[in-house]
Image: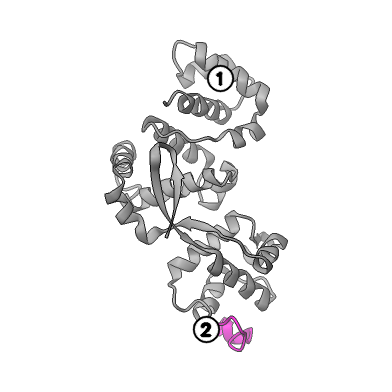
Amino acid sequence: MFYICTPKDTYIPTMEAKEPIVKLIKALTEINIPVQRQLLIDFLMGRQSRQIEDYQLTDKEYFGVGETNDDDFWATIIDTAYENGLIKQMVSKKNALLPTAAGKKFAKKPKSFTIPDDESINEAESDVPEIDSILEQAQADKPTGVHTVSQLAKQQIKLITAIDRHLALDSYAESEGLGLDEVLDELELLAEQKRRLDITYFTDEVLGDDCMNELLDYFRNAKSDDMAEAMKEYGDIYKEEELRLARIVFRMNKIS
């Protein structure tokens, strides 16, 4: 098991995913046609199905190569590969999957690739007090029934890991089926919990240095960082999401 170091000496349990990602990409390459997610999982798991038979996939080398893992595991690997540009979806073919050039390159020359270890999340919750405090605060802030504790833990870990890898937050949101505003909600919650994360790699792309410096100066000198006041001042220049991003950077910069 490996660990990702995050702010305030919090350690997130992770697993090495190089081998399953290589298997996934090589399986897609061997199938050689765009395939739906479930068909791909069935192929990796070595399951017989009408589509598997129709495409004559049972004799392929990688048929059943992932049978020692379950569906959730392969769904996570597929999501991870997509988020990192190793596979792509074809919208014209109902989001059927294909390996990208980067994915094929990775399969030829694989390197270490760690992802959150979902099976260790319960252990992490008990071993890392900060995770518990995040979950308690999140449950207090979220409407009842929106998330379970384990779902909240997984989402927090995924977001922290995405930031650690410098994934674009809008792309991360799309891959998770979320709106960017929901990701900003989570970041604001993390800021409230005194967790400092560096998202300037994203704000540099969205806003640029000059605009970010202008907004940070505003929040530093304003009586409060109230969004309503910020919108009155800059709402005709910046989108609300851009102002929220700047405020998140401001709040996290204040964390010692």
Which is more N-terminal, label 1 or label 2?
2
Q: Quadrant of the N terminus?
A: bottom left
Q: Is residue 133 visible?
A: yes
Q: Is residue 191 above or below residue 60?
A: above
In x, y percent, where is residue 11? Answer: 39, 47
Q: Main secondary structure of the magenta part?
A: loop
Relative side of 104 to 195, left or right: right
- Residue for point 58% across, 46% down: 167
Q: Which quadrant would residue 119 be assigned to in this image?
A: bottom left
- Residue for point 61% across, 89% down: 59
Label at residue 216: 1
- Residue for point 58% across, 72% down: 23
User: Does the stretch in magenta take in 93?
Assistant: no
Q: Is residue 149 above or below residue 130?
A: below
Relative side of 146 to 196, left or right: left
Q: Is residue 93 visible?
A: no
Label at residue 49: 2
In this view, the residue farthest toward the bottom is 59
Q: Is residue 59 above or below residue 145?
A: below
Q: Three-letter amino acid code at disc 2?
A: Ser
Q: Three-letter amino acid code at disc 1?
A: Leu
- Residue for point 58% across, 19% down: 215
In x, y percent, where is residue 14? Answer: 44, 56
Span of residues in magenta? 50-63
